[in-house]
Image (cartoon, rainbow, N blue to C red):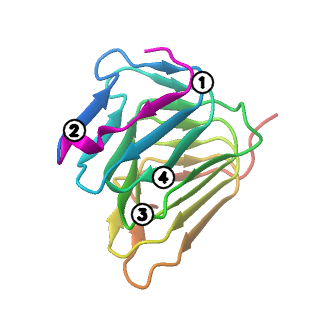
Amino acid sequence: MNGNGQWLTPGSLRGGYFKIGLLNGSTFEGPVRLEAGPDSNQIHIGSYGPTELLDAVDISGFESGDLVFSHSRFHDTWPSRTLVSAHPRMRLLLKDNCLFEGPVTIRVPRFGSNYTTFMKPAVIWKTGNGDDGSIGGNTFRQQVQFKNTASSGKVHLLSGEDKLIDRVPQ
């Protein structure tokens, strides 16, 4: 799927799943806004094929359920990429070889990351209550900052085969 200015709004599915690029991946050349209503279950971007996100990704309208990126590559086309949602029933999951080429700030209520590579500085900020776990296998090539401002709950990220690499050969 190639597109400029994609708006994905499966909120009317009422508990259903909305999957994009399940087998062959997708390329989004323009900005993408992902929205899900209060009764949504999940949007899954990519699965077995690579998904390329070349422009901004707006998740601020994602109200509930899981937003899952698998095999997704966030290109370094912006000075800094930001993934932010304040809706308390939303969870962002990065799975199966996601890649952030540029700096990123992630601020979401619930968060998990498995086998994701962060090439530039990253800020990962959990704002919602509840415990969040990750399998691990993440690679942080530069500085990473973890924040948890929830009134209760934990975020478990550095488990398994996670690597923190503070110097990258030039």
Front one among 168 and 55: 55
- Marks 4 and 2, the one that precedes in the sequence: 2
Number of residues whose C-alpha sits closer than 10 Å to that of mark 1, classed few (under 14), some (14–19) or many (20 or more): some
Q: Secondary structure at mark 4?
A: loop
- Marks 2 and 1, the one that precedes in the sequence: 2
**Magenta-span inclusion, residue 10:** yes
State the separation of the CA atoms marked 4 and 3: 28 Å
Type of amino acid at the residue the image marks with label 3: His
State the separation of the CA atoms marked 4 and 1: 32 Å
Type of amino acid at the residue the image marks with label 2: Tyr
- In the rendered image, which residue does mark 4 sit on? 162
User: Residue 53: image x %, image y %?
Assistant: 55, 28
Disc 4 to disc 2: CB gap under 8 Å: no
In percent of the image, x 42 and y 30: which residue is there?
Answer: 71
- In the rendered image, which residue does mark 3 sit on? 87
State the separation of the CA atoms marked 2 and 3: 19 Å
State the separation of the CA atoms marked 4 and 2: 30 Å
Q: Quadrant of residue 101?
A: top right
Number of residues whose C-alpha sits closer than 10 Å to that of mark 2, classed few (under 14), some (14–19) or many (20 or more): some
Q: Secondary structure at mark 3?
A: loop
- In the rendered image, which residue does mark 2 sit on? 17
Q: Secondary structure at mark 2?
A: strand
- Marks 4 and 3, the one that precedes in the sequence: 3
Taking 73 as reference, is 67 above or below it?
A: below
In percent of the image, x 42 and y 63: which residue is there?
Answer: 87
Quadrant for the N terminus in the image: top left
In percent of the image, x 43 and y 47: which residue is there?
Answer: 137
- In the rendered image, which residue does mark 1 sit on? 30
Q: Hey, which residue is sitting farthest front in the picture?
A: 12
Q: Quadrant of residue 159?
A: bottom left
